[in-house]
Amino acid sequence: MSVASRWLICRWQIALLALCILAFGAATDAKADQNQSIRLLSDEAADACIQDVACMRDLFVQAAFGDNQEADTEALPLFKWNGPVQIGSFFGEGIDDPVQQVIRQSLAQMHLLGRIAGSDLSLAKANGSDVINFILLISDDFATDRDRAFSTLLSNVFGGHVALYDELSSGSSPVCKGHLFAETKASVSGGLGLVDAGVDAAVLGRCLHQAVLNVLGLRYQLPETVDSVLNPTSQRDAWTSVDFLLLKMLHDPALRPGMTRTEVTAIFPKLHQRALSPSS
């Protein structure tokens, strides 16, 4: 029996506690698998931080704005999507079926977590009828797969981003990275996630989850002591409780594209309170 077939779908409550099980409702999808479950990873230190508004404020500010305290805080905008996020995956040549399966299962899990977090995150249908604005490119040789990828799906969505094409072609792109394409006032209109399929399987999950968070707007690394896939030394292969709460706060309607660090911190206690509430 596959991992997906063992998941449990039911009415959900969010309990951001250590090693918690997140149950959730999918009554609107009559064809949903009735055996699905999602487990949010956490540790004792993360649980304490999650309940502490100052701790989560510091993490959110660093993930969304970076930690450059010398920069003009009013010039550092909050990047946020201006509409639904539709993910389409593109696999390079020679990607093994098991790797593709791991990635698709991870994306399905993130889609469900994104729905609960308030993010309008969807997966493109296989028939290609959806308008895709977030491309996930999985390859173990970006230079080889570049032309085929950008000459088909990617060129229609991200045409004109020559600098990014050159980065991919030269092989200088990082193993795991999310790129945003923003309009005025930091309103995100598209994104590109780069995942190196040649990395160790234990690293692949973290890489994928990190790239998606980057594209959704949590663009910066977190300290190595934080239980998050945004921690560059993390061994997690899925979003943790910290990651999930950060995503939920980012998609609070009170946050608008282009807001400054000062504006976000001013309303952060309310964001934190709503994110912790199961009914929010």
Image: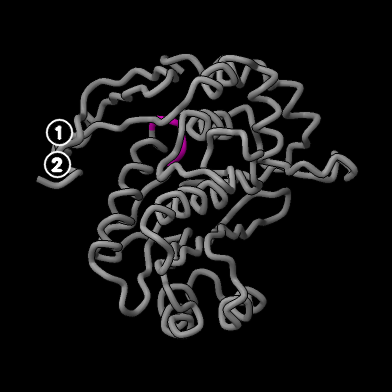
In the rendered structure, does residue 128 fall within the stretch colored magenta? no
Instruction: Establish if 152 lies above or below 230.
Output: below
On residue 5, which mark appears?
2
Residue depicted at 59% across the width and 33% down the height: 226
In the drawing, what numbered circle is on residue 230? none
Q: Position of residue 200 (x, y in %)?
A: 40, 61
CB within 8 Å, label 2 to label 1: yes
Mark 2 residue crowding within 10 angstroms, few (<14) / some (14–19) / many (20+): few
Question: Residue 35 got which mark?
Answer: 1
Question: Label 1 sits on what residue type?
Answer: Asn
Q: Earlier in the sequence, mark 2 or mark 1?
A: 2
Kindly indicate the quadrant of the structure image that contains residue 25.
top left
Q: Nearer the viewer, residue 147 or 223?
A: 223
Q: Is residue 82 visible?
A: no
Quadrant housing the N terminus: top left
Q: How far is disc 2 from disc 1 in space, using C-alphas?
A: 6 Å
Percent of width and height locating residue 118: 45, 32
Work out whether 202 lies above or below 246: below
Q: Quadrant of residue 20?
A: top left
Number of numbered tags placed on the structure image: 2
Q: Magenta span covers which residues?
A: 116-120
Q: Element type at marker 2?
A: helix
Q: Is residue 19 left or right of residue 64?
A: left
Q: Residue at x 66, y 31 (%)?
A: 59
Q: Residues within 10 Å of mark 1 (few under 14, many from 20)?
A: few
Please name whichever residue, 162 or 222, is drawn nearer the observer in this view of the structure: 222
Residue 239: percent from the left, percent from the top? 44, 39
> For the residue labelled by badge 1, is the local secondary structure a helix, a strand or a loop?
loop
